Image (spheres, rainbow, N blue to C red):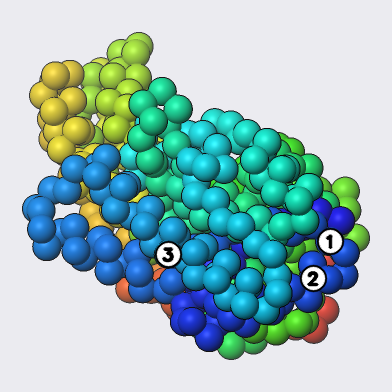
Amino acid sequence: MLIVQKYGGTSVGTLERIKNVAAKVKARSQEGHQMVVVLSAMSGVTDGLIKLAKEISRKPDPREMDVLMATGEQQSVALFCMAAKDIGLPAGSLLGFQAAILTDRMFGKARITDVETARIQEYLRRGKVVVVAGFQGLDWDSGDVTTLGRGGSDTTAVALAAALKADVCEIYTDVEGVFTADPNLVPNARKLEAVSYEEMLEMASLGAKVLDIRSVEFATKFGVKIHVRSTFSDREGTMVVPEDQITERLMISGVAHNKNEARLTIKGVPDTPGIASKIFTPISAAGIVVDVIIQNTSAEGKTDLTFTVPKTDYDQAKRILKRTAKEIGAAEVLGDTRIAKVSVIGIGMRNHAGVATKMFAALASENINIKTINTSEIKISCVIDERYTELAVRVLHEAFGLGQEKPPVAEDVV
């Protein structure tokens, strides 16, 4: 088998942990598997680099910021290979540009456009474990180093698994798999044996921090099987697979929450064709992802438009929106950073009524006001006051019976 493994920052957070990971990889290699290992920076290193950059410059240059940030993973792969060779495991490190992980030029949050596997394949033919620096790539046109943003090592691993046609991509982290809710908030949250790509995509986009959303997109597109498991346990984790491989369809698979949300409203917008494009085009050009969009009914040729963005992009999005408001003759721009989103997700809700009613009733029972609602076939999301986030997650987890040994499956719902 060809196995791609990814180890996160906590998994390689100390020299002792790096040695332990090297021993785990050696054990799998000795079973006869070809191994490609993707590593994140040691825990705390990335934050330390960001701190250094901000201490030396009020507004660090994006290109140089990526050059700096890429050094964290460079450190990890070099140390790992040293540890591996000391225990008799032939290993070779490759940085993003050496592995030919090609990206666009969006510094700080670049997207992978292609992966050239020739050098990796050559290492594998020579019997080496290939150790690739996660989170980084190369803008082919300029030759510049790029980074993929938070969670980028997950994306590196799944993209490599897709390009190499690996049998499985194992994502090792500090949790044992995908849970019905954040175990830090809900003590009786349960580990799921399997989730579909579609459910995992929704969970990742709605705040679940187990997998980066771009890694799930790659897995979905190329059919990569992902096994999410703990570095610190030998127990089976959670498989992320196509929907037709899910044997038990829970009505609700999980409750997700996201506090990295901010809301913007542009009031008094002329209700004319093309106005939405004028509002959102400059925001998109800045690389800002817009989520929930709500437009009020037009009155006297004017309307209000509300949408959410990541809280980290709020200030930039608000500046852009204010410029646009002047250009189109809108009345004013309002914002709110004290919001959060709570969501219920499950492929079992696709053909069953009553999920929304139960969700709204559960929130109402705790006097939690819903500001906006967004739905898809397999998810319902509510924007609420940030201060009620933890309470909302717990009450929804309880309302849908997710802490039970056998939670309701789709067939149980009438």
The answer to whether one can see residue 263 in this image is: no
Q: Look at the numbered disc 2 and give the secondary structure of its residue.
A: helix
Q: Position of residue 367 (x, y in %)?
A: 41, 73
Q: Label 1 belongs to which residue? A: 33
As drawn, 296 above or below 109: above
Q: Position of residue 249 (x, y in %)?
A: 83, 60
243, above or below 210, in the image: above
Secondary structure under tag 1 reads: loop
The amino acid sitting under disc 1 is His
Quadrant, the N terminus: bottom right
Q: Position of residue 199 (x, y in %)?
A: 68, 54
- Secondary structure of the residue carrying tag 3 is helix
Check disc 3 and give the amino acid type. Gln
Give the position of the C terminus as an image quadrant: bottom right
Give, as a three-letter code, the residue at label 2.
Answer: Arg
Disc 1, disc 2: CB below 8 Å?
yes
Q: Does residue 289 appear left or right of residue 170 in this picture?
A: left
> Which picture quadrant has residue 145?
top left
Q: Is residue 64 above or below residue 339?
A: above
* Residue 136 in view (yes/no): yes
Q: Which residue is mark 2?
A: 28
Residue name at image x 55 percent, y 51 percent: 94
Of the numbered discs in the image, which one, if any, rests on residue 75? 3
In the foreground, 331 or 221: 221
Q: Is residue 98 left or right of residue 225?
A: left
Q: CA distance from mark 1 to mark 2?
A: 6 Å
